[in-house]
């Protein structure tokens, strides 16, 4: 990717998302070239003149130190998960099948999937928790009314390009969701005690059959402590299509999102 190519990509981004006041990236040569060519002021994370740049420039580019991807934190984690999945998926696609149009549409679906991840509950009603996601911040939409085709199989990959994109997007969703939830529920050996779930906690439910961009969320309404005082079983209230339902689940089947909002 040349500096010219990257500048075009950046212009497309600004045209869609609006003016950007701050960029963050690693020290890729194409990024550095774009900064120099556009006259954007770039700064190092350890530069003592950071405050001066922030005060005097409308557009700032922050570079991470070389060979320090951990400075990227959240976005590097997201990139790493997506890259591993895409590398594995695209190796299975034969030459000539992945046209520019198919790839561009597929990557737009990938971005929508990654931006659908829940961040925090933003609802005054704890009985029906409403989740805030990066996608909602970007689109200013409070609902995800995107039509998702779940009835497609691998055979549809070869029938039309739009079906091919949807099959690939469904595959990416299943893999990405699995890795994302695993990262949220990292467990070592069962030899360390963790904080017990409480009534009022908001949790994700593991559901392999849920449609793309859907994150089943429930409210813990009852806990069942064992003889040793540890909670291993929960009663969870879920509202689906406006109708409440109650399920009993093991703690291994739920991922905590937020402590009780009492």
Image (cartoon, rainbow, N blue to C red):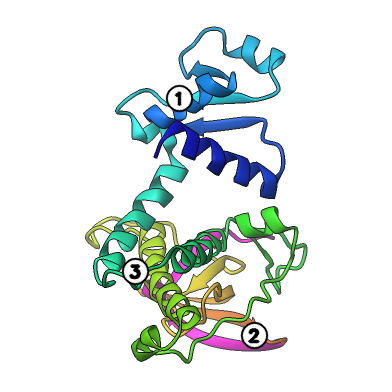
Element on which disc 2 rests? strand
Q: Quadrant of the N terminus?
A: top left
Q: Is residue 27 magenta?
A: no
Pointer 3 residue: 228
Q: Give the mark count.
A: 3
Camera-side residue: 256 or 19? 19
Point out residue 85 in the picture as x, y percentages from the top left corner.
32, 62
Point out residue 182 in the picture as x, y percentages from the top left corner.
35, 63
Q: Is residue 251 magenta?
A: yes
Is 195 situated above or below 152? above
Pointer 1 residue: 33
Camera-side residue: 28 or 22? 28
Q: Are marks 2 and 1 in contact (CB under 8 Å)?
A: no
Element on which disc 3 rests? loop
Pointer 2 residue: 240
* Residues packed near mark 3 inside 10 Å, few (<14), some (14 to 19) or many (20 plus): few
Mark seen at residue 23: none
The answer to whether one can see residue 181 in this image is yes
Q: Are marks 3 and 1 in contact (CB under 8 Å)?
A: no
Element on which disc 1 rests? helix
- Position of 28 with respect to 119 (left or right) is left
The magenta-colored residue range is 243-262
Point out residue 204 in the picture as x, y percentages from the top left corner.
51, 70
Q: Quadrant of the C terminus?
A: bottom right
- Position of 160 with respect to 95 (left or right) is right
Q: Please name the residue shown 36% across and 73% down the image.
A: 252
């Amino acid at each position: 990717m040349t500096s010219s190519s990257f500048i075009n990509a950046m212009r497309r981004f600004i045209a869609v998302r609006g003016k950007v006041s701050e960029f963050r990236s690693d020290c890729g040569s194409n990024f550095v070239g774009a900064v120099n060519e556009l006259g954007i002021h770039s700064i190092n994370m350890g530069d003592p003149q950071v405050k001066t740049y922030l005060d005097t420039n409308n557009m700032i580019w922050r570079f991470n130190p070389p060979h320090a991807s951990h400075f990227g934190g959240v976005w590097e984690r997201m990139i790493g998960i997506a890259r591993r999945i895409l590398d594995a998926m695209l190796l299975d696609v034969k030459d000539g099948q992945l046209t520019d149009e198919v790839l561009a549409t597929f990557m737009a679906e990938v971005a929508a999937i990654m931006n659908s991840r829940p961040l925090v509950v933003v609802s005054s009603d704890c009985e029906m928790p409403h989740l805030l996601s990066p996608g909602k911040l970007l689109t200013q939409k409070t609902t995800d009314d995107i039509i998702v085709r779940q009835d497609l199989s691998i055979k549809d990959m070869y029938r039309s390009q739009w079906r091919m994109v949807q099959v690939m997007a469904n595959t990416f969703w299943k893999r990405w969701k699995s890795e994302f939830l695993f990262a949220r529920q990292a467990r070592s050996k069962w030899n360390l005690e963790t904080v017990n779930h409480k009534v009022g906690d908001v949790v994700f439910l593991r559901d392999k059959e849920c449609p793309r961009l859907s994150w089943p969320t429930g409210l813990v309404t009852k806990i069942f402590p064992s003889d040793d005082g540890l909670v291993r079983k929960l009663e969870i209230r879920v509202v689906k299509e406006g109708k409440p339902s109650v399920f009993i689940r093991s703690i291994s089947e739920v991922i905590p999102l937020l402590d009780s909002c009492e």
